[in-house]
Amino acid sequence: MGLTPQLTAPLLFCLLACTTASPAHRCDDDALREIIKTLNTLSGRKTPCTELTVADIFDFAGPQNTSEMENLCRAMTVLQQTYQNGSELTQCLTRRKEHDILHHLRRLYRALYSRVTLKHCPVNDSTKSTWKHFLENLKRLMKKKYLQCGSSTF
């Protein structure tokens, strides 16, 4: 029993569509929930270190020329820059003995790294935002992604 020509094209299309879905576009509710939980923990912490500045990568007011994947990649780049030797945020958190915040930032970086297919995105440092706003904007983006996946727990 062979495939008829009428079934071959739709079957191949479905197989192609299902196997080429990138991890960033899949709706992994558990992973998204974990990222949002980590962001809630981080943004709920009161420390003067979150008032330090970071590149403002989110432009929600301007035209939406940046894809979700690009925003996540840039967020990942900003988080990665946090771990560079001498980072102002790392120094501040280390001085204040707030190593758990660094742990949560590393966890967040790893979670984003596993979802983002782009691995290097340049970040424009000309506009600045606080770490607090960066975390809130990233949380807003992740909640939007979570809602697009059909979940509404948050």
Image (tube, grey):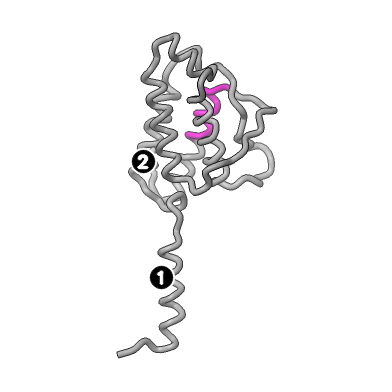
Residue 153 got which mark? 2
Quadrant that contains the N terminus: bottom left
Q: How far from the left and from the top, in percent, is residue 119?
A: 52, 43
Q: Is most of the magenta stretch helix, strand or loop? A: helix
Q: Earlier in the sequence, mark 2 or mark 1?
A: 1
Q: How far from the left and from the top, in percent, is residue 147?
A: 44, 46
Q: Amino acid at mark 1?
A: Leu
Q: How far from the left and from the top, in percent, is residue 37?
A: 37, 32
Q: How many marks?
A: 2
Categorize mark 2 by other alpha carbons within 10 Å: few (<14), some (14-19), many (20+): few
On screen, 97 above or below 120?
Answer: above
Residue lying farthest to the front in this orientation: 85
Identify which residue, 83 or 11, lies in the foreground.
Answer: 83
> How far, Cα to Cα, is label 2 from label 1?
31 Å
Residue 15 got which mark? 1
Categorize mark 1 by other alpha carbons within 10 Å: few (<14), some (14-19), many (20+): few
Which residue lies at the image location 38% right of the left edge and 32% below the top edge?
A: 107
Task: Look at the numbered discs 2 and 1 and tell me whether their residues touch, using CB distance below 8 Å.
Answer: no
Q: How far from the left and from the top, in percent, is residue 82?
A: 51, 25
Q: Secondary structure at mark 1?
A: helix
Residue range highlighted in magenta: 130-139
Quadrant that contains the C terminus: top left
Q: Secondary structure at mark 2?
A: loop
Residue 132 highlighted magenta (yes or no)? yes
